[in-house]
Image (cartoon, grey):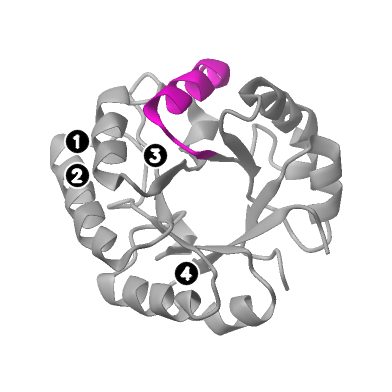
Amino acid sequence: MSDFKREVCLENITLLEKAIASGADRIELCNQLEVGGTTVSYGMAQYAIHRCAEVSIPVMLLIRPRAGDFVFNESEITVMLSDIKQLKELKPAGFVIGCLTQENAIDLMAMERLVSEARPHEVTFHMAFDQVADPYAAIDQLFELGVSRILMHGTNSAIEDNCAQIASYIAYAANRLIIMPGGGVTTQNALLLHEATGAKELHGTRLLW
């Protein structure tokens, strides 16, 4: 048994039973993976959380109102707050969120509101992190906001080429929050990435098959 957790990203519930049977440690549930994921429906979330509760697998829900960039206006933030408030009723493990400014910094005001609404559930900051101009400052800010985990890929297209970068972020985070590599993580390279970076959690759509 490996000593790292595998978070499997699923588009709606199509592969839910396969993920359960294959030994997923945690599931991130979203819609529209072809555009990087958007918020899943209440019905999909309800089904997945209920089914996964039967086998003690936690479910994280992506909150993203649309495709495109991660700079959200007030109307979109209002929608995200409403989605979190409603989906909290289902008692997921937590939410996956990410808001940036036009200057590629963490949108602190938006994130503070969203993290506050999500409490007491945990929050993962998603791959919008790869776009921030100062990732080390962003790690500090997200920790201060109470974010539990950062999902990131790195600046090179192949995740295997980002091992040094990922390891640097993990060392800087110093267990204050979790740095979770994703995007291109597969059954073939998961162990290599774990050993090369020290990552304790990995994320992907092809982690188990």
**Which region of the structure is painted magenta?**
133-149
Q: Are marks 3 and 2 in contact (CB under 8 Å)?
A: no
Percent x, y for residue 40? Answer: 34, 65
At horizontal 62% and vertical 37% (from top left) the residue drawn is 179
Q: Amino acid at mark 4?
A: Glu
Q: Residue at x 39, y 78 (%)?
A: 50
Q: CA distance from mark 3 to mark 4?
A: 18 Å
Residue at 75% x, 30% y: name it.
Answer: 167
Q: Is residue 21 magenta?
A: no
Report whether residue 158 is seen.
Answer: no
Q: Which residue is mark 2?
A: 76
Q: Amino acid at mark 3?
A: Gly
x then y, percent, for residue 206: 68, 65
Estimate the spatial distance between the alpha carbons at disc 3 and disc 2, rounded to whole Å.
12 Å
First in sequence, mark 3 or 4: give its number: 4
- Residue topped by disc 4: 11
Say which of 85 and 74 sits in front. Answer: 85
- Say which residue appears at 49% left-offset and 81% top-offset: 54
Q: Which mark is residue 169?
A: none
Q: Can you identify the residue that label 3 sits on?
A: 98
Quadrant housing the N terminus: bottom right
Is residue 142 on the magenta stretch?
yes
Is 77 displayed left or right of 57 in the figure?
left
Q: CA distance from mark 3 to mark 1?
A: 13 Å
Q: Residues within 10 Å of mark 1 (few under 14, many from 20)?
A: few
- Quarter of the figure with residue 151: top right
Q: Residues within 10 Å of mark 2 (few under 14, many from 20)?
A: some
